[in-house]
Image (cartoon, rainbow, N blue to C red):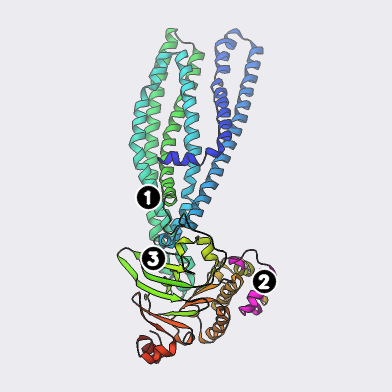
Amino acid sequence: MSIYRRVLKYYRPFLPQILLGLILSLVGIGLNLLKPWPFKFIVDRVIPDRDAHLVLLLCGALVLIQFLWGICNWLTNYIFVKVGLEALLKVRTELYSHLQRLSLKFHDTRRSADLSFRVTYDSQAIQTIFNKGFTGIFGSTITLVGTFVIMLRLDWQLALLSLAVVPLLMGSIYFFAARIRRESTSIQEHESAVLTQAQEGLSSIRMVHAFGREDFEVHQFHLQAQQSLQANLRLTLTNVNSALVISTLMVLGTAAMYYVGTMHVLAGSLSLGSLLVFSAYLLMLYQPLESLTYTAWAMEGATAGAKRCFEVLERADDVVDLPSAVAIESAQGAIAFRHVSFGYAQDRQVMHDVDLAIAPNQIVALVGGTGAGKSTLLSLVPRFYDPNSGNVTFDGVDVREITKKSLRSQIAIVLQDTLLFSTTVRENIAYGRPGATDEEIAEAAKRAQADEFILQLPNGYDNLVGERGAHLSVGQRQRIGIARAFLKDAPILLLDEPTSALDPTTEAAIMDTIKELMRGRTTIIATHRLATIHDVDLIVVLENGRVAEQGRGEDLVRRGGVYAKLYSSGKFE
């Protein structure tokens, strides 16, 4: 399916408005074609006959024509712009929705700033293709045909002469079109890179300041912006060159018409008024030709942006609900990994034939070095990824047979770095359960031992936390994340290094809260802080994506294996 057919799909719901706009456009074009005639009558009849009354009537007719044309043009533009914006809203929403549903494997390989650029800027191509493309082509084509028909009736020789430059114009359009598309694509890629550089530099401003790398970050941004500048200059130069060629060809056609038209007037085969009207129509003829030229180039640029949008929309989700998948309302909490192998890429396996059974309400700790596969194993439970082989079961059912939404509704997650949105404390706690009451939110905060510091904030639960929770300390953010898990009250709890970023005092306090959170839930905690998990129900030691050993802490110490060496050393790594 071509890009333009894909774009048209977003305008089908607005066909009645588009048809009304086209009708008004036709009326406006007809009125525009009438504009030169009052002046022709003034030159050919009023001036020779010295009829002052008729000139007043003709001038009034010109004003009326212009007024009616203005009304039609205003309505047409309003309708088409509104339709274009509605379609833009539709494609932006669909694009963002699709990105939200694509698996983490897709997002792991893409820059978030590039995806943001596609949603906010590339998507505007949908509106450009319609407002500057389809509607522009329609109006220009009708104007061109109507103007040429009238010119033929006035003087067919001059009309044909006026079209002599058209093949040259079409050749110029073809010559510059491919270059404009290529350079427009380059601009969008470089602009996306500029946005990425700015976003990364500003989001990491504390790290930049801490290491005194301000000058380096400015230099990196300057390099990206310089490349964008060069790309814009190349496109500008192409546009200027093309405009020079087009305008020169049109002047050649105009000059030829003036010469032949003057000869016809001198020979008596054409009146002066007709020549003046013909000159006005020549401008009307060349104007849509020029408009079609620039429309073609605008379409080339917009096509580049549209292609970047459709690249995302056509990307299939790697983790999909099977047609037979069912929604679950509740869960016992039994989890099992059966011969699970997984890799983020086909040639890079990170999990190898993992077998692990977790009983309901059991607390299991995953320990292992960096890259051992702890976080990866956690990510397979809520189906952030699907294993390459083997399967993960939930209460004895393959998780692929359960809808993702209902599966994840049974799971609460607390991460090493709690992700907060730049909204209020209340909304962040209730993120996993939007319908929660204020009393339920406050109770969850109390259980997470967060209520005290929240009430000390200037606006309490309505206090804004800042971007990514910048107004709060690491420990405070973690407590809000724990409160979020308390409020969700899910039977499964996943903890990914929940205390590794905390100081010992804060860690001890947070662990007391986490132990309360784990009570009565099937819990999997990934950590390298062995002191915090030595007494859990089951410890699983991972090495290079394999289960090296598993058992209770004291039993593993007695075996004298990997865990015993780590535990006796007093540190993990």
When the figure is inspected, residue 151 is found, relative to residue 501, above or below; the finding is above
**Disc 1 versus disc 2: distance between alpha carbons?**
52 Å
Callout 1–callout 2 Cβ contact below 8 Å: no
Please tell me which residue lies in front, 16 or 57.
16
Q: Secondary structure at mark 3?
A: loop
Residue 180 in percent (x, y) is at 37, 42
Residues rendered magenta in the picture: 430-454
Is residue 465 toward the left or the right of residue 390 in the image? right
Please tell me which residue lies in front, 268 or 515.
515
Of the numbered discs 1 and 2, the one sitting upstream in the chain is: 1
* Badge number at residue 440: 2
Q: Quadrant of residue 58?
A: top right
Q: Secondary structure at mark 1?
A: helix
Q: Amino acid at mark 3?
A: Pro
Q: Quadrant of residue 254?
A: top left
Residue at left 43%, top 58%?
A: 194
Is residue 380 toward the left or the right of residue 327 in the image? left
Residue 431 in percent (x, y) is at 59, 66
The residue that mark 3 highlights is 387
Residue 73 in percent (x, y) is at 58, 31
Residue 340 visible in image: yes
Q: Amino acid at mark 2?
A: Glu
The residue that mark 1 highlights is 186
Residue at left 49%, top 13%?
A: 272
Crowding at dot 1, Cα within 10 Å, few <14 / some 14-19 / many 20+, comes out as: many
When the figure is inspected, residue 398 is found, relative to residue 151, above or below; the finding is below
Q: Amino acid at mark 1?
A: Ser
Of the numbered discs 3 and 2, the one sitting upstream in the chain is: 3
Of the numbered discs 1 and 3, the one sitting upstream in the chain is: 1
Which residue occupies the extreme left position in the image?
347
Q: Secondary structure at mark 2?
A: helix
Q: Quadrant of residue 518?
A: bottom right
